[in-house]
Image (spheres, grey):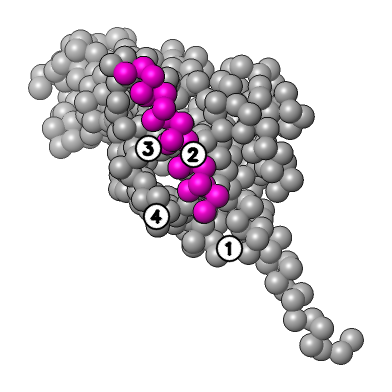
Amino acid sequence: MRGRIEKRYKNSYTIIIDAGRDPVTGRRNRVHRNVSVPKKKDAEDIMKQMMAEMDGGVAIASKKITISELVSRWLETYAKPRLAAKTYVSYSQLLNHHVVPALGPVCLSDLKPIHLEKLYAELFKSGNKKKENIGLSYRTVSYIHSVMHKMLDSAVKWQLVTRNIADAVDLPSRKSQKKPTASLTEEQASLLLSKAKETPHYITVLLAVLTGMRRGEILALRWDDINLESGRITVQRSLQYTAEAGVFFKEPKTGRSRYVYASPLVVSALEYHRTKQESEKTELDSLYEDQGLVICQPNGLPQHPDTISSWFPKFCVSIGLPRIRFHDLRHTHASLLLRKGINAKVVSDRLGHSGIGITMDVYSHILDDQATETAAALDDLAPL
């Protein structure tokens, strides 16, 4: 590491330190600092201290590195080699859609906690790119904050900055931003299933409502995963899609398989679906590419995940129900079970949550209602 001092004017000097090539941009990284001191010797002492700090791992970001450049390099050098394809796409979309438009031109060395505070406040207010003046959910903004924190952690490890400024940023309380999850009532769910029975997507909708499995888990189910005698379904993979990888299978979101028990009604529907599928398979003969999938295209190949997601909201509207997402059937399943008094731990295990805390948090509005009812459950024991 080499440094030099240039005199600007009386009692003012510029310290220039050559810190090697920037690991993010690949450009030569020169750190400049202007100082006002009585003598050049004083400037030399400051330069030596700076060089010692940088040799010890305390770095100063190059003024040339912008947040936009950092995002690009971090996604390519850190995220892409380490993350699952869908997670990488998610990180890329969050950063490029929400962070870069707002903070892209800002130099990394100038980034302050207030920049992130203002960004998150704006995202809560009107961050939805598809719907004007509609904010992002707490969960999405929290996710963006988590990704930003990881990226800035890398910047610290790459010795571009001395600290992660995201450590100094606190999101608003979740309760102040949280909206109840969308779900159907018991009557609405009954109507949905009766109408869906007339469509090719009945078994997919039925599994979502009565098992709570995720879309990708349902579409990845194979007949070998289902014990029709006991009703036990093994959830051990998920079907996903990205533009780069296409349709592909991966392990479940939590990284481990789980068991979901199906009701007699679901088992009966699966048996009928299998009989119908075998008949269609026989008709297509060699044109059928059998992958053992429960839900598939007419030729046996995996069904694109967007097929059901695109069809479902329109179908709901067509039968007089609120326009909800297919994923909201998972919320419907959990909400109906909790309202029937099923233990939250049992529901958490059924959903495949990594911990009961997630279930308690997502469905706190239902659990709060139950807690209120429980508080008065024994009131009739005491005289007024």
Number of residues whose C-alpha sits closer than 10 Å to that of mark 3, classed few (under 14), some (14–19) or many (20 or more): many
Looking at the rendered structure, which numbered label has been put on residue 221?
3
Q: Amino acid at mark 3?
A: Leu
Q: Which mark is residue 272?
A: 2
Residue type pointed to by label 2: Tyr
- The residue that mark 1 highlights is 342
Real-space CA distance between mark 2 and mark 4, rounded to the nearest whole angstrom: 14 Å
- Which of the 4 image quarters holds residue 133? top right
Q: CA distance from mark 3 to mark 4?
A: 17 Å
Instruction: Decide whether residue 306 is among the magenta residues.
Output: no
Residue found farthest to the left = 1
Q: Position of residue 51 (x, y in %)?
A: 16, 28
Which image quarter holds the C terminus?
Answer: bottom right
Lower position in the chain sequence, tag 1 or tag 4:
4
The answer to which quarter of the image holds residue 311 is top right
Q: Earlier in the sequence, mark 2 or mark 4?
A: 4
Q: Main secondary structure of the magenta part?
A: helix
Residue 344 in sight here: yes
State the separation of the CA atoms marked 1 and 4: 24 Å
| Residue occupied by mark 4 | 229
Q: Residue at x 74, y 68 (%)?
A: 373
